[in-house]
Image (cartoon, rainbow, N blue to C red):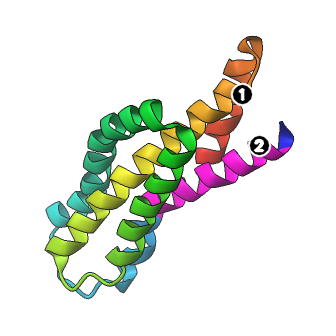
Amino acid sequence: QRSLMLTLGTSTAACAVHMLQPIFLAPLLDWPLTPVQRGLVSSAFFAGYAVGVFGWAWLSDRRGRRPAILLSFLVGNLGGVASFFAPSFGPFLALRLLCGVGVAGAKNALFLLGTEFAPPGSRAHVGAHLAYWWV
């Protein structure tokens, strides 16, 4: 149980890093962004997250948690890493959206996987511990 929680927890923390990625990218951007455009950076991620939840939930229920987690990590990492190399603001936003789609699948499937392995009486406790890794 401990190794499972450690694995799921560190994976959840990796998802949180993708969410915070624009904070690290902002000083590196040479683009003259308006305040609205700066707000769109986070909004694009969370729009992708909101859309991605539905598709990944369906895939996770049909094909299993592991394939959904692996594929969603691939999608999230692809969007996250590629956003470092975006040539302009439009592709950057699209890649942040893709990153959000991937993180949605990974984070939710990781949470579900952790609580499914816990005894029914301990699921709230396990869920809370997994949520600690997000912050």
Instruction: Compare residues 15 and 26 and report the one nearer the observer.
Output: 15
Which residues fall within the magenta stretch? 3-20
CA gap between label 2 and label 1 equals 9 Å
The x and y percentages for residue 46 are 31, 48
Q: Is 7 displayed left or right of 70 in the figure?
A: right
**Name of the residue lying farthest toward the top:** 121
Q: Looking at the image, is 32 positioned above or below residue 123? A: below
Tell me which residue sits at (37%, 85%) in the image: 28
Q: Mark 2 and mark 1 in contact? Answer it, CB < 8 Å.
A: yes
The x and y percentages for residue 43 are 25, 52
Q: Which is the main secondary structure of the residues drawn in magenta?
A: helix
* Residue under pointer 2: 4
Q: SS at mark 2?
A: helix
Q: Amino acid at mark 2?
A: Leu
Q: Is 133 displayed left or right of 45 in the figure?
A: right
Q: Is residue 90 visible?
A: yes
Q: Is residue 135 visible?
A: no
* Residue under pointer 1: 117
Instruction: Compare residues 17 and 109 and report the one nearer the observer.
Output: 109
Q: Looking at the image, is 13 positioned above or below residue 110? A: below
- Quarter of the picture holding the N terminus: top right
Residue 109 falls inside the magenta stretch: no
Tell me which residue sits at (68%, 47%) in the image: 9
**Name of the residue lying farthest toward the front:** 63
Q: Earlier in the sequence, mark 2 or mark 1?
A: 2
Q: Looking at the image, is 27 positioned above or below residue 120? A: below
The x and y percentages for residue 97 are 27, 58
